[in-house]
Structure formats: C-alpha cells, structure tokens
Image (tube, rainbow, N blue to C red):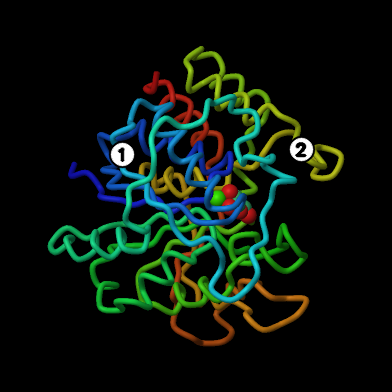
Amino acid sequence: MARTSIVIDTDPGQDDAVAILLALAERGHLDLLGITTVAGNVPVELTTANALRLVELAGRADLPVFRGASRPLLRKLKTAEFICGPDGLQGAGLPPPRGAPRDAHAVAFLLDTLRNAAGKPVTLCPLGPLTNIALALAQEPALAARIERIVLMGGARDLGNVTPAAEFNFFVDPHAAQIVLQSGVPIVMFGLNATHQAMATPERVGRIAAHGTAVARAVTGMLERPRPGGKAKFGVEGHPLHDPCVIAYLLWPELFTGRDCHVAVETAGEASIGRSLIDWWGSQRQPANAHVIDRIDDAEMFRRLAQSLAKLG
Ligand code: RIB
Ligand code: CA
C-alpha cells in the first residue's frame, strides 16, 4: 500500500508528543515530510524545542522541524501550562534538544511542500491552533487543491474544555479555524466528544511502560502524571489522548465512525468565542464541510498504539 505523505502541525503538548511518536513509529505507512510548530499549549519557542526533543528521542534528528506562528491571527495568545507543565512536556524527562529548527518559517515550508505535491497530494494533520494552516491558505488559496485532506483535532460537539463553549485549539485561534473550515479542503474533525473516549487509563499506560524503552519511559512519564482535576472532576482516571486520534485515523480508519456535517466557528461572541457549531442534525441545510468523528473503538486503538510505540527504541 502506498505511503501517505503527511505534515504534522503541532503545539507539543504531551498528547501531541504521542501523536508524533506514533507517526514516526509507523513510517512504513506514513511519510512524515516535516513538522511545523505553532504557539498553543506553550509558546512557540517551547513547542519548537519540544518537537526537536521528540524527533531526537525517536532517532529521527534528520526530520525537519519548522518554527511557525508565535500568536493567533487576531486574538492574544492563551497557553495551557496548567495542563502540560511549564515546558509543555512535563513528565517526559527529555534533555534539551541538540538540533535546531530549519531556517524557513513553517508557513513557507507548508507552501513549498504543497507546490511540490503535484500528483501526490499531502495530508495535513493539525494538532494545535490552526494559525499556520490558515496563513498558508490565505497566502496561496490555489494550493488548497494540493491538500488531500486535513485531519485535525479541534472543536467539540458538546462541552468545551477551556470555556463551556470552546475547545482549546479553536478557542486560541477561532479565526484560523473558521478560515480552514471554509477552505473547501476535505476535513476530518476530531472534537472533544470523540477524543474524550481515548482515555490513557493506568492499565493502558502500563502496557506501554512494559516495553521498557526510552520512548516507553518518556510516554509513561507524561501520561502517569496526575491530570489536574482527575477522577474527582472527570469521573475517570487518566489523560485523554486527543491528538493521537488524528494519526490513528490515518492508520486504522476502521476504528472510527462519524458523520458529514456543516461546521462553523463562533468568532465574535464574548462567552461563546471559539465554539464549533456542528450541525449534527443538518437543520441548517448547509453543505457539509467536515466529517465529524463521534465514535472510537478506543480499546483497539490503544492496543494498536502500544504495539506501534514498541517499534521505537
Ligand atoms: O483541546 C485539546 C487540544 O488542545 C489538544 O490538541 C491539546 O494538545 C491542545 O493543543
Ligand atoms: Ca495539541
């Protein structure tokens, strides 16, 4: 089977880290052309350093990392150190990176990659705020035709996680999210209602820890740390693995079900800004612009995730 060419756009973040490691573990199926970083969980200097730490952990210091947007298109940056720790990878226990990002900006890399993608479209995998993707689409709209699909983590059909209305990635940059959703590019969207099914419970983390590799130790360290609020607040142990769902979908689409819906993003409301308005019942009679995932076979996903991560040293 031909490999899928992908670019991961990311704000590592522990869940981003597991997604990146999964993609690197499955290089027989996924041709990761590069990683572009964006401000989100932590400022872009740190998300970039974290992306470098992760490719070095996986023995792929050759993989190009490109620093991207340091702030959303219009809003002030909101970060999430209270969740992922001051450097964004609390628990990983990784040394500072040895390498450096490439000179080109992330958006320039995205555009160059799409220009060179004639005949072999590229799948974009945004795992953070969509600022870089929106900037690339705004700069050269015609290159949208070279994007095979955008498989993204963002939004929520039900409650948000930053406000009752909004999920973090869409909350940080709602204008970018709206630009991407209106781009006409085929989109697969993993909102919180789907990704909250992907719980890294102690039993599931234990299966990864058992490999005893450097990657297993880093992943275990990240996922074993207490989740703010934890079981008392959420009723279940463990961290939701939002971003790995995106990569798992590319590898094992049979584990996921969803529905084609029209999705818009609130960009003006005070209390509701960043809300993803998913027309699940088609009541607005507007053309669908995203395939919204709502069910995950999480047990099988974690079984395969553990097997894949074991491929990395
Ligand atoms: O709301 C969860 C999303 O926001 C995840 O991608 C997490 O890494 C943060 O970016
Ligand atoms: Ca993320």
Question: Residue 104's x, y, as percent?
Answer: 32, 56
Callout 2 environment at 10 Å: few (<14), some (14 to 19), or many (20+)?
few
| Residue denoted by label 2 | 236
Q: Nearer the viewer, residue 202 or 177?
A: 177
Disc 2 under 8 Å from ligand 1? The reply is no
The quarter of the rendered structure image containing the N terminus is: top left
Q: In the structure shown, which secondary structural element does the residue marked by tag 1 occupy? A: loop
Please indicate, yes or no, whether residue 37 appears anywhere in the rendered image.
yes
Callout 1 environment at 10 Å: few (<14), some (14 to 19), or many (20+)?
some
Disc 1 under 8 Å from ligand 2? The reply is no
Residue at the image position 31 percent from the left and 78 percent from the top: 141
- Give the answer, above or below, for where 199 lies relative to 222: below
Q: Is residue 119 left or right of residue 9?
A: left
Q: Nearer the viewer, residue 263 or 131?
A: 131
Q: Nearer the viewer, residue 91 or 191?
A: 91
Q: Is residue 196 left or right of residue 249?
A: right
Cα distance between the residues tagged 2 and 1? 36 Å
Q: Nearer the viewer, mark 2 or mark 1?
A: 1
Q: Nearer the viewer, residue 305 or 108?
A: 108
Q: Earlier in the sequence, mark 2 or mark 1?
A: 1
Question: Residue 22's x, y, as percent?
Answer: 42, 35
Question: Residue 82's x, y, as percent?
Answer: 75, 46
| Residue denoted by label 1 | 63
Please indicate, yes or no, whether residue 194 appears anywhere in the rendered image.
no
Residue at the image position 71 percent from the left and 82 percent from the top: 269
Disc on res. 211: none
Q: In the structure shown, which secondary structural element does the residue marked by tag 2 occupy? A: loop
**Amino acid beneath label 1:** Leu
Question: Residue 83's x, y, as percent?
Answer: 71, 44
Residue at the image position 73 percent from the left and 76 percent from the top: 272
